[in-house]
Image (cartoon, rainbow, N blue to C red):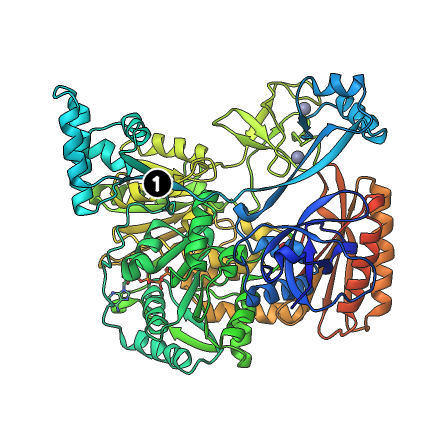
Amino acid sequence: MSTVAKVIVDVPTMQTDRPFDYLIPSVLAGEIRPGMRVWVQFGSGKRQVSGMVVGLAEAPAFDGELKPILAVLDPEPVMDQERLDLAHWLAQTTYAFWITCIQTMLPTMLKVDTVRYVTAGPAASDATAALLAGRDQLELTPDLDPATMAQILTLLAHEGLTLHYQSKDRAKVKTVDHVVPLLTPEAYAELQTTVRANAAKQQLLLTSLANWATTKQTPSVKTIETTVGLTRSQLTAAAGKGWLRLEPREVYRNPYPQYTGEKLTTPLPLTTDQQAVVSQINDATGAKRAETFLLEGVTGSGKTEVYLQAIAKALAMGRTALMLVPEIALTPQMVQRVKGRFGNAVAVLHSGLSDGEKFDEWRRIARGEAAVVVGARSAAFAPLTNIGLFIIDEEHESSYKQDDAPRYHTRDVIRHRAALHHAPVVLGSATPSLESRARAEKGVYTLLRLPNRINHQALPTVSLIDMREAYQNGAQGDFSKELLTALQLRLDRHEQSVLLLNRRGYSSFVMCRECGYVVQCPNCDISLTLHMDTHTLKCHYCGHEEAIPHVCPNCGSNKIRYYGTGTQKVESALHELLPAARVLRMDVDTTRKKGGHEKILRAFGNHEADILLGTQMIAKGLDYPDVTLVGVINADTSLGLPDFRASERTFQLLTQVSGRAGRADKPGEVIVQSFNPDHYAIRYAQKQDYEGFFRQEMAIRHRGDYPPYFFTVKVTVSHQDEQQAAKAIYSLANELKQALSDQALVLGPTPGAIARLKNRYYYQIVIKYKNEPQLGPTLARILDETQQSTRRGFQIGIDREPVNFI
Ligand SMILES: Nc1ncnc2c1ncn2[C@@H]1O[C@H](COP(=O)(O)OP(=O)(O)OP(=O)(O)O)[C@@H](O)[C@H]1O
Ligand SMILES: [Zn+2]
Ligand SMILES: [Zn+2]
């Protein structure tokens, strides 16, 4: 019998980043299993925290006295052994705390909040009584004013108060009340004779109860309210008389009530190309081979149908399937495709769900009630078991990399899990990341190709408009004459258009034309972004918000103007230039509300608009048959970013958005406006020539010693004092240079792209390397040392293969 539990406590620091031994008290003997959350005392004080049991042992590893486990928070483990191991692996490979990784893998509702409160202590005084003011206890919330807090601390020190900790689980199971008849039909009939004949509702209730008792029904209160016309209070009163019992029953919050669970579609007959691809994947699934495939398929080549038929194979083997899509591509269309094929076997996980809905979908998966999971990045940790197939759609998307700790790449997590499950991975994209395509070149991944659109429909023709010349040829505002004519033609033909405003690396800001002053955030070294809907300026990093100034805060001039092309500005220009056009705008502002995305896309799908105008978020996954024109207003804003991936991102964006045109029987046309029409990324995107772009970009990366030829790690140090941050990064750079071979390059130190964020100063170095066995241990040591000095206000971040370089 195990007597000791190994617990990772919810205290994310370096010193606590290992399992601690706790005694399993005899009342809990045999109850505690790895993967359960527990409540324990931590440290020398009375502090109590939650923790995760990661293992059991017969006897303690050391011979001090062990503290006992105080309570078990879960009746069943919430993590199985596979995911406990995954959390450990994640912590080691991303330099994150073990507890942070565990929490990343659990739904928000399984986070345990610690409530702290005080009660009168052994040496309670008048001050104690005054503070508690008649209450038994006072909760210590962050909004207590400093004076009260100071008073509490003094009283605690003199035992005038006692401090207590309590766990508050956020997990809430939703229930619905059902009516359970308690008497026989005969007894209800008998009662009817005793109730006044004109007490119509009572009679109705008794008749209904007799009926339910006969047919053994237990309808929900809600059903009774709507179909029978009795109220909850009437039912509650009847329960008081012993006629019935109200029974709460667990229900799942259903994020997609519009789907009935019916399987609406059947597998399409595959094209020859699709067939070849599906059989290669299914071979690996059948043989339980953890092979990684890169599916390079042009836009509209039918990748989704390939995924669906590959999933069907895994299900036929009695296994499950995990499919990841980028958050913004998780459109109703995508959900519909998967749910339409597999019905109720599908669970969906993404950030648009409420915490309750996520928790319920998560439990459906954990209980084995869902065999197919479709989700965004964090669904990589879905509690599926016996997984037979993994899919990552749009594998090039940078959102698959998490920016905060744990800084993991979804691809790595999935490949790690696939190896354990002996299952293949399919990475799909029309524009694979250079890293993945290069791995396919080396044979690490198996390359599969779908070089044609379905039914050999042509890829759309792409024309480039040189915006440097366009203004001599009648361009108005942001629109060339060609683009306006093409839009007008679509209006005449009742076809639809998609307009992309490339806003990467771009924002609308307020600048003084007299002195050049740009309004900046007082906390962060970054310009504030203009929001016309609220008429304010906002900082996208710290949330600071202020009114738009009428005079320049710097020189007092009134020549302060808005700059930049925002979607709102383009929208109003469209209304002027094409008054008949119905425009739907999709950007961060119009999609902020829950379900905002869906609403806009559904409206566009229903032809409630002629033009869908939006940012990056409209570039992916959309499959509308009547879209015959795609316009790109400003192709090159993303080329200017000081990031070696700027060309790759621009190429991907243009190719993906072009792919939205002409996907059904009508041919598509794309018009790309650019100030750099000769740039190779734009040229290759015009030809939709991924392979050509890949070759040229690889040559450039080779010359510059960039990934995929080199690996990269970014190390960031921050402190509230700029001097301190700078000093720390220089000594860190020296330490690294000494530990590494002269093949490795240490770039920097440089101030962060945003040197000051939330009043902290950031400095960073980037290490480029090929093979450095000393790097891992050195980084681990640096992390350790810096963590020891968190007292002095340092924070450190280690990011392997960062997506944001600056
Ligand atoms: N075998 C098939 N027979 C007929 N139609 C098909 C077949 N396979 C796919 N399609 C249809 O072709 C269209 C394009 O397919 P799909 O959206 O899967 O392409 P995709 O490769 O995922 O494109 P993108 O990368 O642009 O999102 C869809 O409307 C789909 O229903
Ligand atoms: Zn700010
Ligand atoms: Zn000014």
Q: Quadrant of the N terminus?
A: bottom right
State the SS at label 1: strand
Q: Nearer the viewer, residue 185 or 714?
A: 185
- In the rendered image, the vertical position of residue 16 relative to residue 561, given as above or below: below
The residue that label 1 is drawn on is 247
Q: Position of residue 541 (x, y in %)?
A: 63, 39
Locate ligand 1 by image quadrant: bottom left
580 or 237, nearer to the observer:
237
Q: The residue under label 1 is which amino acid type?
A: Glu
- Residue 558 lies left or right of residue 629; in this view the side is right
Please determine whether, in this image, residue 419 is positioned above or below residue 118. below
Which image quadrant is residue 604 in?
A: top left
Mark 1 crowd level (few <14, some 14–19, many ≥20, 10 Å Cα): some
Choose top left, top right, bottom left or bottom right for residue 648: bottom right
Picture residue at 56% right of the left edge, 64% below the top: 83
363 or 570: nearer the eye? Answer: 363
Question: Residue 219, percent across and down?
Answer: 25, 41
